[in-house]
């Protein structure tokens, strides 16, 4: 196992009715900017619960943060923060609203020019406004990490940054928010969380049995509970287990002391940037290709995944690897997510564009930093 330091200060407030604790977790005297998305919070009662909990605070609202939040929109919120002397950001929504809010928190205090450089040049976040989150969609793990992914429409770029400064002070996870989620978003959440675990697990062995078994327990829980949520949105117990799995999948715990991959995410972000495909769906397309081209490097962990999660014990090494990839594809498709590029109308022109972009960037991806533009071409062509 590698050396590591782990510090996660996010206070999690979990369970039915807990949105009522929003106000008591915000520092007294704060001037709040309440950020939200396209309006789902007005239809499912989440907005009303939040508002009644933050009575007594001065609150300004900023809505309209899109899925795959746009830099252009977020910069408008930064103006509001500055003009109104906002001291606290309250994100009420899914991963996009929260990621957007993290960027607003950092951009509003950025002193070195255009805040886009936090994403494009990895300029460090030295200060950020404090954030609280009421999560309405289990998927990204953003509620308990310091990551954010932002899209710049002008240049068709979707880039990520990470900083402990933008970890929420608290995140409220009430599984009842799942009751109003459309099937498509539940499926996205299951697959996104599943692939987060895979990116931190499916690399090469470093003798880390605790992390491995934590990771496998999250995968198995998603496989068991996810379909129950899809079948019956009002199943509170399944919703609770799904929601906690998605948080545990990307709060840094299973990543400690082990190598991480993230190639599937890096390639997937380009598919969203160019074609607007939902984040999780891009992962379902790309992951089988990455597993296939990296079958030698990832051999031990693919076999372990096959055996411990999918129960695959028979056949030669290659047969077991093929079977494990197929079972993973079957799982994605069983929750209603197609896994091939033509299912989304993507053709070879996009593959060329994505490969040239990676070529221009000049770095390689994957746990061994050995996946370059030509490997990315192989991954994507295998998904045609
Ligand atoms: O905008 P509203 O009206 O709220 O509707 C949203 C949106 O249309 C809707 N929704 C959310 N909660 C709902 C609901 N509808 C009904 N009932 C509810 N309770 O769902 C739609 C999608 O929301 P979005 O926030 O975009 O989804 P998600 O949480 O999957 O976030 C995706 C974004 O997170 C990034 C992705 O790249 C993408 O931009 N990621 C962030 C990560 C992180 N911060 O660690 C890691 C991930 O890998 C991912 O990259
Ligand atoms: Zn993801």
Image: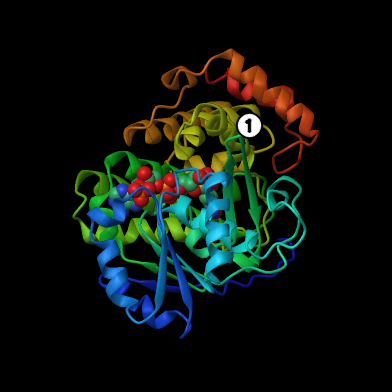
Closest to the observer: 59 or 138?
59
Q: Residue at x 30, y 70 (%)?
A: 51
- Quadrant for residue 93, please give it: bottom left
Closest to the observer: 321 or 250?
250
Q: How many marks?
A: 1
Residue 227 x, y percent position in the rendering: 28, 44
Inspect this view and state whether residue 50 appears.
Answer: yes
Image vertical order of residue 154 relative to residue 349, above or below: below
Q: Give SS at disc 1.
A: loop
- Quadrant for residue 138, please give it: bottom left
Closest to the observer: 175 or 91?
91
Q: Residue at x 59, y 27 (%)?
A: 292
Q: In which quadrant will I find the N terminus?
A: bottom right
Residue 306 x, y percent position in the rendering: 49, 40
Q: Residue furthest top?
A: 348
Say which residue label 1 marks.
295
Q: Residue furthest right?
A: 362
Image vertical order of residue 54 relative to residue 82, above or below: below
Q: Residue at x 54, y 52 (%)?
A: 76
Colouring chosen for the image of the structure: rainbow
Q: Residue furthest front?
A: 83
Disc 1 within 8 angstroms of ligand 2 (CB): no
Image vertical order of residue 302 relative to residue 46, above or below: above
């Amino acid at each position: 196992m590698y050396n590591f330091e782990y510090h996660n200060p996010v206070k999690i407030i979990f369970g039915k009715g807990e949105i009522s604790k929003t106000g008591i977790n915000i520092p007294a005297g704060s001037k709040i900017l309440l950020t939200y998305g396209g309006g789902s919070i007005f239809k499912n009662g989440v907005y009303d619960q939040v508002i009644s909990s933050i009575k007594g605070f001065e609150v300004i609202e900023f809505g309209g943060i899109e899925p795959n939040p746009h830099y252009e929109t977020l910069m408008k919120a930064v103006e509001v923060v500055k003009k109104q002397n906002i001291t606290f950001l309250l994100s009420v929504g899914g991963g996009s609203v929260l990621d957007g809010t993290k960027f607003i928190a950092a951009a509003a205090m950025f002193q070195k020019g255009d805040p886009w450089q936090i994403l494009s040049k990895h300029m460090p976040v030295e200060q950020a406004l404090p954030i609280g989150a009421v999560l309405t969609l289990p998927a990204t793990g953003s509620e308990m990490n310091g990551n954010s992914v932002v899209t710049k429409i002008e240049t068709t770029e979707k880039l990520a940054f990470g900083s402990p400064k933008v970890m929420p002070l608290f995140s409220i996870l009430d599984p009842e928010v799942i009751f109003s989620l459309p099937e498509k978003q539940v499926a996205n959440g299951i697959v996104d969380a599943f692939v987060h675990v895979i990116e931190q697990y499916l690399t090469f062995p470093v003798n880390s049995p605790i992390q491995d078994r934590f990771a496998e327990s999250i995968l198995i829980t998603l496989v068991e509970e996810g379909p129950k949520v899809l079948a019956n949105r009002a199943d509170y117990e399944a919703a609770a287990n799904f929601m906690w799995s998605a948080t545990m999948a990307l709060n840094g715990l299973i990543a400690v002391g082990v190598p991480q991959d993230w190639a599937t995410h890096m390639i997937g972000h380009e598919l969203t940037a160019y074609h607007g495909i939902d984040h999780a769906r891009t992962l379902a397309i790309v992951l089988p290709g990455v597993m296939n081209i990296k079958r030698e490097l990832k051999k031990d962990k693919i076999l372990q995944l096959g055996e411990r999660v999918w129960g695959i014990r028979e056949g030669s090494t290659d047969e077991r690897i093929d079977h494990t990839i197929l079972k993973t594809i079957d799982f994605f498709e069983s929750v209603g997510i197609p896994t091939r590029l033509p299912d989304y109308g993507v053709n070879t022109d996009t593959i060329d564009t994505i490969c040239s972009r990676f070529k221009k960037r000049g770095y390689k991806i994957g746990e061994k930093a050995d996946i370059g533009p030509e490997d990315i071409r192989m991954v994507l062509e295998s998904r045609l």
